[in-house]
Structure formats: structure tokens, C-alpha cells
């Protein structure tokens, strides 16, 4: 028995550490849908870190409050206690204007052709874009304690806190830290 432990003990310890790491700390996730276009595309694969301290603009995986079986990938916009407002495609948080440069590619396409070319794969999305007055509809919310306000980057078609409400802290599964698929698009999420 001592010989077996001597030869295989390290292997079993490493395997147990890997399994614990995979179950409790690092979780792979597949992006499902187009709500995070163009930042993240449908079918891309991410690594999420479950022990992260969630900050504004982090991309997170969260259960949807209106359907706890669904896991969504969204961007944190409002932290607990924040007053979040969108007016004429300008985001303000607690009265301060906030730059959302990650939205520029789709905002520019919206200005050019109301995203008709970007949405050529889906006539329903084209119709939504064609009838939209702004890339992000106006809103004002005050985020309750222990909750977050999340949005998809593809604001016209994203189902997010504007539809399903605030996300309780306990529903956030982790922060997306790495895109690992497709291989030619491997990158960190910062």
C-alpha cells in the first residue's frame, strides 16, 4: 500500500485539487445569444472566476431573476445604492457622466444604418432596430442594497435588468476573466 501511495499519491492530490478548483472557483461558460455583441459573440467560451469582488463594468454570469434556470452573461452597470440613468444615449451614475467606449462599434453602426447590416442574420432584430429612436432607451433606476443593475452591450435586443429587474448578489455566479474560444480570439476580459 505504501508503494501505491508513493507512486500515485501526488497524482490523486493534484486531481483532487483540479476538481475542487473546477467546482468551486473556476467555471467554463458558453455565451448563448447576441445580447453581448460585439464584445462577446454567440458560442464563444469563457472562464469565470467565482471568488471575484464584483465591480462596475465587470462582465458577469448571473441567473436571470425571472427564470432561475437561465444563466446570462451581462455587464454590471449599477452597484448597490447607485442612481443609474440613461438619457439620449448618455449614461450617468450618481449624477456623473460615464464613458461606455465598449459600445462605440454598435453605436456607430446604429447611427449609419440602424444596425440593419449588423442584424442581417435576424429580420426581427432588424425590425427592432429600425423602429428604435436611440441605441439605449432612456431609463432611471436606483439600485437596492445587495443588488446590481446589469445590461447587455447589444442594448437594442438585450434582455437585462430593464426587463427582468435587479440581480441579487447571490445570483451572480462569477466574473468572466478569460475568453478561450475561439482560439484566435483568446483574451482577458479587462
Image (tube, helix red, strand yellow):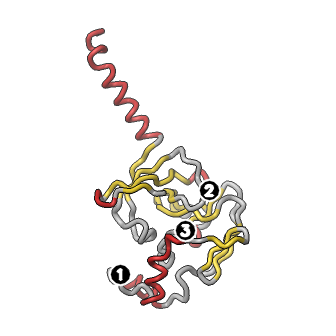
Q: Position of residue 110 (x, y in %)?
A: 46, 85
- Marker disc for residue 151: 3
At horizontal 47% and vertical 40% (from top left) the residue drawn is 24
Quarter-of-image position of residue 142:
bottom right
Give the residue number, with chain letter if any, for mark 1. Answer: 122
First reached walking from the N terminus: tag 2 or tag 3: 3
Task: Name the side, left or right, on which 63 lies relative to 55.
Answer: left
Q: Residue furthest top?
A: 2
Q: Position of residue 80 (x, y in %)?
A: 68, 58
Per the image, label 3 sits on a secondary structure element best described as strand
Quarter-of-image position of residue 146:
bottom right
For the residues carrying marks 2 and 3, which lies nearer the camera in this image? 3
Per the image, label 2 sits on a secondary structure element best described as strand
Mark 1 Cα shell of 10 Å, populated few (<14), some (14-19), many (≥20): few
First reached walking from the N terminus: tag 1 or tag 2: 1
Are circles 1 and 2 on residues that touch, CB within 8 Å? no
Amino acid at each position: 500500500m505504501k508503494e501505491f501511495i508513493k507512486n500515485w499519491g501526488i497524482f490523486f492530490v493534484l486531481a483532487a485539487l483540479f476538481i475542487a478548483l473546477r467546482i468551486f472557483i473556476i467555471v467554463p461558460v458558453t455565451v448563448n445569444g447576441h445580447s453581448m455583441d460585439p464584445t462577446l459573440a454567440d458560442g464563444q467560451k469563457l472562464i469565470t472566476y467565482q471568488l471575484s469582488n464584483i465591480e462596475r463594468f465587470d462582465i458577469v454570469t448571473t441567473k436571470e431573476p425571472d427564470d432561475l434556470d437561465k444563466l446570462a452573461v451581462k455587464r454590471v452597470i449599477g452597484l448597490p445604492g447607485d442612481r443609474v440613468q440613461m438619457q439620449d444615449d448618455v449614461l450617468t451614475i450618481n449624477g456623473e457622466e460615464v464613458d461606455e467606449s465598449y459600445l462605440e462599434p454598435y453605436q456607430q453602426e446604429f447611427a449609419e444604418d440602424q444596425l440593419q447590416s449588423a442584424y442581417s442574420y435576424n429580420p426581427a432584430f432588424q425590425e427592432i432596430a429600425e423602429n428604435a429612436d436611440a441605441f439605449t432607451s432612456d431609463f432611471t433606476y436606483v439600485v437596492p442594497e445587495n443588488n446590481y443593475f446589469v445590461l447587455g452591450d447589444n442594448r437594442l435586443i438585450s434582455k437585462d435588468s430593464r426587463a427582468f429587474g435587479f440581480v441579487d448578489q447571490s445570483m451572480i455566479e462569477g466574473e468572466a476573466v478569460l475568453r478561450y474560444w475561439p482560439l484566435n480570439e483568446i483574451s482577458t476580459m479587462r
